[in-house]
Image (spheres, grey):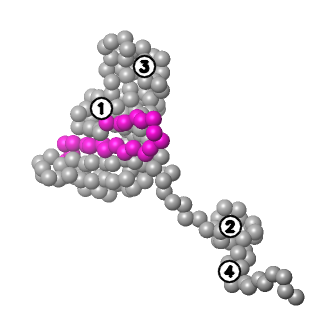
């Protein structure tokens, strides 16, 4: 509870509170806003579409280790038309956020929902083992996984121009590999 607002902490420790998850995902045609409640939710300048139990999440683990976690989002009850749309919309590397929201007994949003997971789409799979009710599984990797990727950068004139156009400090590096330099002779 270290990153929750004071209002959220008091509501959770105070007894009766309703929790919900909000999911924001980027796709090739735009951003989608859904939440685990029923009906529409107006928050942060967006209308979040409530899809209730049709959306499911793996648990989001929080550890003391600096370690990249992943989470799987499952969308159930999709139609075959939604499956074909999803296949065209999924692109690796697209951003996804999961928020935790608290509501009071009257259904009012308490404070601002907190981000509990921020990542990028790694794998999108269609599970059509049950043709009557296919589901879409989206695996998101935590943004820390990007730190583990190797950086392919070379000390070449072309890459120096990408970083600093007009800087000619590396234009002769390629020619140095074939130069024979003899020290201490006349």
- In this orientation, which residue lies closer to the viewer: 166 or 149? 149
Quadrant into which the N terminus falls: top left
Q: CA distance from mark 3 to mark 1?
A: 18 Å
Q: Which residues are magenta?
A: 59-79
Q: Position of residue 167 (x, y in %)?
A: 75, 66
Magenta span contains residue 74: yes
Q: In the rendering, at what x and y percent does residue 8 appear? A: 42, 19
Q: Is residue 39 visible?
A: no
Q: Going by the picture, which residue comes out furthest to the front?
A: 184
Task: Point out which mark residue 56 bears.
Answer: none
N-terminal of the pair, mark 2 or mark 3, is: 3
Mark 4 vs mark 2, CA separation in Å: 20 Å
Which is more N-terminal, label 4 or label 3? Answer: 3
- Res 52 → quadrant: top left
Q: Which mark is residue 161?
A: 2
Q: Examine the rendered structure and indicate whether residue 181 appears above or below residue 87.
A: below
Read off the residue under disc 4.
Answer: 177
Which residue is at a point 31% across and 36% down the rendered structure image?
59
The residue that label 1 is drawn on is 36
- Location of residue 10 (image quadrant): top left
Give the position of the C terminus as an image quadrant: bottom right
**Residue at numbered disc 3:** 8
Task: Tell me the SS state at disc 3.
Answer: helix
């Amino acid at each position: 509870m270290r990153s929750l607002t004071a209002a959220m902490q008091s509501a959770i420790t105070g007894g009766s509170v309703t929790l919900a998850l909000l999911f924001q995902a980027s796709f090739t045609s735009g951003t989608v806003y859904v939440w685990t409640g029923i009906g529409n939710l107006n928050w942060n300048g967006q209308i979040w579409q409530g899809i209730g139990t049709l959306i499911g999440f793996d648990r989001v683990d929080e550890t003391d280790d600096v370690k990249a976690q992943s989470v799987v989002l499952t969308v159930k009850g999709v139609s075959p038309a939604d499956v074909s749309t999803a296949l065209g919309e999924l692109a690796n590397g697209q951003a996804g956020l999961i928020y935790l929201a608290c509501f009071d007994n009257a259904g009012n949003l308490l404070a601002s929902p907190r981000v509990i997971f921020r990542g990028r789409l790694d794998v999108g799979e269609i599970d059509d083992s049950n043709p009557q009710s296919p589901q879409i599984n989206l695996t998101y990797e935590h943004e820390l996984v990007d730190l583990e990727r190797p950086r392919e950068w070379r000390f070449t004139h072309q890459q120096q121009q990408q970083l600093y156009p007009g800087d000619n400090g590396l234009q002769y590096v390629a020619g140095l590999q074939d130069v024979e330099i003899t020290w201490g002779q006349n």
